[in-house]
Amino acid sequence: MKVSKALKSRLKKQTPRWFVFLIDIHFTALAFFIAIAITWQSDWSVGLNNSIIIAGISAVVYPLSFLFFKSYKGIIRHTGLRDIVTVLKASSFAMLLLLLALYVIDAPDPKHSLILVVIHYLVTITSLVFLRILYKRIYLQFIQPHR
């Protein structure tokens, strides 16, 4: 019972921005593993070697893009169209930077690299937008049900 009250009390306050940033990074990484599984369904030996390069670049580009666009700064419990557009901008910018980096370094197997980056982008934006909407829904239903 005390845990429930403490959680409600904490959620009534603003979720720390660094926490939102870490969740975004976590789900971006998870989206990358999902994209790898979808892209390299049958040829894992080639796929993993190629994906390591893309993962390294992605691990730098996405967090920098989130920092640049400040996608973590919105108050998650009040998520609206503005926050969703910011997530889309940040993720789209990161994807474009990633594609540019792959072109510059002349990544092996460009067809699969492109597919991997696009699938990663789609899974990332879907999960980040879904999480924000889910958090807002949970907040409105359980934390402030009288609204």
Image (cartoon, rainbow, N blue to C red):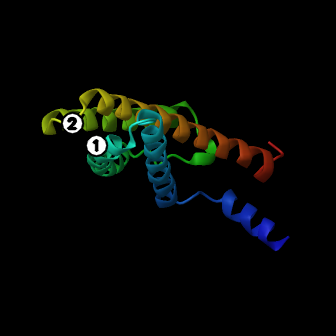
Q: Amino acid at mark 2?
A: Pro
Judging from the image, what secondary structure is the residue with disc 2 in? loop
Quadrant showing the C terminus: top right
Q: Amino acid at mark 1?
A: Asn
Extreme residue in the top direction? 111
Q: Are marks 2 and 1 in contact (CB under 8 Å)?
A: yes
- Residue position for label 2: 108
Judging from the image, what secondary structure is the residue with disc 1 in? helix
Q: Where is 131 relative to 23, above or below?
A: above
Spot occupied by residue 118 in the image (x, y as percentages of width and height) = 38, 30
Q: Residue 115 appears in which quarter of the rendering?
A: top left
Measuring 26% from the left and 47% from the top, which residue is drawn there?
53
Front in this rendered view, residue 44 or 1: 44
Measuring 79% from the left and 45% from the top, which residue is drawn there?
141
Q: Residues within 10 Å of mark 1 (few under 14, many from 20)?
A: some
Front in this rendered view, residue 11 or 58: 58
Query: Can residue 68 be seen from the camera position used here?
Result: no
Query: Can residue 118 be seen from the camera position used here?
Result: yes
Q: Residues within 10 Å of mark 2 (few under 14, many from 20)?
A: some
Spot occupied by residue 78 in the image (x, y as percentages of width and height) = 61, 42
**First in sequence: mark 2 vs mark 1:** 1
How far separated are the C-alphas under marks 2 and 1? 7 Å
Q: Where is 76 relative to 109, above or below?
A: below
Query: What is the number of the mark on residue 50?
Result: 1
